[in-house]
Amino acid sequence: MRCPYCRHADSRVVDSREADDGQLIRRRRACLECGKRFTTVEEAVLAVVKRSGVTEPFSRTKIIGGVRKACQGRPVDEDSIALLAQRVEETVRAKGAAEIPSNEVGLAILGPLRDLDEVAYLRFASVYRSFDSLADFEHEIETLRAAARAREAAGAEPAGEQ
Ligand SMILES: [Zn+2]
């Protein structure tokens, strides 16, 4: 790891501490040449295994891209999308596995996306679950309606007739 100030190749660690519940380690380093200090972060690479068997590193940016696409034209701001992607990453990392199948990443997106925007959720689910008929959409919409009714019934206030 080269010094970001002078590009010197050697540095020494002056402090190490765990962050994010031990998910990563931050090291404070001092350059042996110019003496300036900088911080490095070390974390385990989480590999996503695609259906083809090919693995690629987990990428929060990729999650954001996919969700943003599903949210096109919807009243969803960038902060909410970034937060959703963070939740997804926490969910998949919490499993503690070094590798995770890509469909589990998709599953981890569906729940929070449904809470965020139901239309975006339907778009995402139709691609992710490869809907190929209107019946698939109808079934998913019926599930959403049932969940909404359940929420209403559980709420303290009567929500009125719809
Ligand atoms: Zn330096």
Image (cartoon, grey):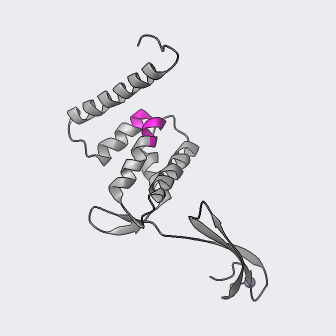
Query: In the visual, does 159 lie left or right of 106?
Result: right
Q: Decide if residue 71 is in sight here.
A: no
Nearer to the camera, 20 or 123:
20
Query: Percent x, y for residue 58?
Result: 44, 63
Q: Foreground residue, 119 or 29?
A: 29
Quadrant assignment for the N terminus: bottom right
Residue at left offset 42%, top offset 47%: 109
Instruction: Based on the picture, tell me whether residue 138 belongs to the magenta stretch.
Output: no
For the point 48% across and 57% down, which residue is it? 94
Residue under the point 42% across and 10% down: 161
Q: Is residue 68 left or right of residue 2?
A: left
Instruction: Please identify the residue farthest to the top as the structure is shown.
Output: 161
Taking depth in this image into account, of 73 and 76 the one nearest to the observer is 76
**Could you tell me which quadrant the C terminus lies in?**
top left
In the image: residue 79, left or right of residue 134 = right
Give residue 149's position: percent from left, percent from top: 39, 22
The location of residue 79, given as percent across then percent down, is 58, 45
Q: In which quarter of the image is ligand 1?
A: bottom right
Q: Please state the extent of the stretch shown in magenta in the rendering.
A: 112-120
- Looking at the image, residue 5 lies above or below residue 114: below
Residue 108 visible, this orientation: yes
Across the whole image, how many numbered discs are drawn on residues? 0
Looking at the picture, how far across and down is residue 138, in whole percent?
26, 30
Predominant secondary structure in magenta? helix
Residue at left offset 46%, top offset 11%: 160
Q: Which residue lies furthest to the right in this view?
A: 35
Q: Does residue 73 sit above or below 35 in this rendering?
A: above
Vertical relation: 114 (above or below) 156: below
Q: Is residue 117 magenta?
A: yes
In this rendering, the answer to whether 13 lies above or below 17 is below
